[in-house]
Image (cartoon, helix red, strand yellow):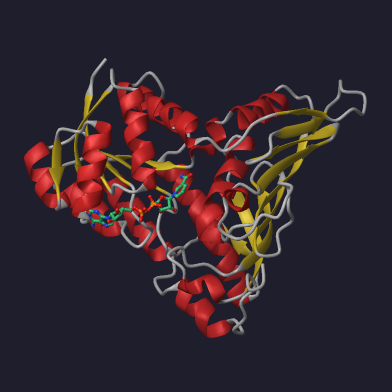
């Protein structure tokens, strides 16, 4: 078993969870340095996590440290530049945050570069390690709801924030059978200017290669599954997302901020339920442990690997293409559009802020 030399760029809230995840697996990862352009954040982060060396510049850190694992937890506008930098410096393991990019063209470039370099990539869609997600997966995999027919995913937050999580968990519950086609509708321009640029609301229907159907509702008009007055931006707002797996003999649902429910073959019509909530402090170490298993070879892959994540990202972006071009979109795309889908939405959607008044 190896111990992997690890560095982190981005000392914000998500950087903290990544640091905790690596340090919870300290037998496998040696977190030697961190980097941020904000000196106060950097100093505080290093002190809090007892990280020996700090850098204001990611390239300087790569030159000095020559890490095995390059982790970055920056806002979505900073992706391709750090991937290119890390690959140029010989890094072959990259761990970064969702969304994979803000644009499909950029995600396609990241995916192609990492594949060409033979790099291992993981992107953090870690909510599925939560006990309520795991319980629903057990129920589905045990055949307790019969044969899976449809997966319905919802989130109150917008596509670039929660949509990539939703698509990833739809794929995971469906044992990574890929999306064959998708048909979508997008509206609302308020969040196109956000750090996670998105239409305010996206609705879509899709078919997976194994014949299962999927429905996604993401953003301002999605239904509520967490009780209460979940105002935009509060924690209950962020966790008001659900995945319901329908089968021939019942259903099972996980709500990120509100446990799980199921009616199964054996429940006799009774709704079974259990607790569970968003807890990155619990989820992140398990996600990082799976990375160690992949790097060691004791696991052949990671359930958040770059290929899976790119496919999920492509599916979310295909919702925009479908809406803009008023057609069903088959996946994988034969050619990746190189223009900005966000700019096309801005130019084509009637201006309206669907989140206004929430
Ligand atoms: N996986 C999840 O469950 C989850 C939850 C919340 C947020 N996120 C994602 O995490 C990402 C980061 O979110 P956050 O809230 O931690 O952001 P943040 O803005 O708090 O932190 C990002 C940090 O990166 C630093 N930074 C940016 N560019 C840099 C560069 N080139 N070199 C060095 N430092 C740089 C910034 O100064 C900042 O301190 C986002 O993409 C977000 O979508 C994921």
In the picture, the quarter occupied by the C terminus is bottom right
Q: Which image quarter: residue 110?
A: bottom left
The one nearer the camera, 116 or 357, is 357
Quadrant, the N terminus: top left
Question: Horizontal placement of 148 versus 114: left or right?
Answer: right
Q: Could you tell me which residue is drawn at 83 percent across and 27 percent down?
A: 264
Q: Is 36 or 117 nearer to us in this picture? A: 36
The residue furthest top is: 1
Instruction: Name the outermost residue toward the left.
Output: 64
Question: Closest to the observer: 132 or 215?
Answer: 132
User: Which residue corresponds to the image point at 68% horizontal and 26% vertical from the top-left?
Assistant: 141
**Residue 147 location (% of width, % of height):** 78, 32
Give residue 281's position: percent from left, percent from top: 45, 32
Quarter of the image for residue 104 reads bottom left
Q: Please name whichever residue, 78 or 148, is drawn nearer the observer in this view of the structure.
A: 78
Relative placement, left or right, of 161 versus 36 is right
- In the image, residue 108 sits, relative to residue 50, either above or below, namely below
Image spot of residue 58 (x, y percent): 17, 50
Q: Is residue 141 above or below residue 86?
A: above
The image shows residue 18, relative to residue 340, as above or below, that is: above
Whether residue 312 is visible: yes
Residue at 57 percent of width and 70 percent of height: 199
Judge left or right: residue 90 versus residue 96: left
User: Based on the displayed image, in which of its 4 quarters is residue 163 positioned?
Assistant: bottom right
Residue at 48%, 42% in the rendered image: 125
């Amino acid at each position: 078993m190896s111990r992997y030399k690890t560095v982190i760029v981005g000392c914000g809230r998500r950087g903290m969870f990544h640091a905790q995840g690596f340090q919870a697996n300290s037998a496998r990862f040696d977190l030697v340095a961190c980097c941020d352009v904000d000196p106060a954040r950097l100093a505080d982060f290093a002190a809090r996590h007892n990280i020996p060396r700090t850098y204001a510049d990611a390239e300087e850190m790569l030159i000095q440290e020559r890490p095995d694992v390059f982790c970055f937890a920056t806002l979505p506008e900073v992706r391709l530049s750090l991937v290119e930098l890390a690959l140029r410096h010989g890094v072959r393991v990259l761990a970064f945050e969702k969304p994979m990019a803000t644009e499909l063209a950029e995600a396609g470039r990241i995916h192609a570069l990492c594949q060409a370099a033979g790099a291992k990539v993981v992107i953090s869609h870690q909510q599925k390690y939560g006990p309520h997600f795991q319980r629903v997966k057990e129920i589905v995999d045990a055949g307790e709801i019969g044969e899976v027919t449809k997966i319905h995913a919802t989130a109150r937050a917008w596509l670039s924030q929660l949509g990539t999580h939703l698509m990833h968990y739809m794929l995971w519950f469906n044992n990574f059978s890929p999306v064959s086609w998708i048909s979508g509708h997008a509206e609302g321009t308020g969040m196109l200017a956000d750090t996670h640029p998105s239409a305010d609301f996206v609705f879509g229907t899709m078919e997976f290669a194994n014949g299962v159907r999927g429905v996604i509702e993401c953003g301002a008009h999605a239904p509520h599954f967490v009780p209460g007055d979940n105002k935009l931006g509060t924690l209950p707002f962020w966790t008001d997302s659900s995945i319901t797996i329908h089968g021939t003999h019942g259903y099972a649902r996980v709500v990120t901020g509100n446990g799980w429910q199921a009616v199964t073959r054996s429940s006799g019509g009774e709704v079974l339920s259990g607790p569970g909530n968003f807890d990155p402090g619990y989820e992140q170490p398990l996600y990082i442990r799976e990375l160690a298993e992949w790097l060691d070879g004791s696991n052949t892959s990671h359930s958040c690997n770059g290929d899976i994540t790119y496919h999920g990202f492509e599916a979310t972006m295909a919702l925009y293409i479908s809406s803009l071009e008023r057609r069903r979109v088959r996946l994988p795309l034969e050619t990746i559009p190189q223009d900005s889908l966000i700019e096309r939405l801005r130019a084509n959607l009637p201006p309206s802020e669907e989140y206004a008044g929430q």
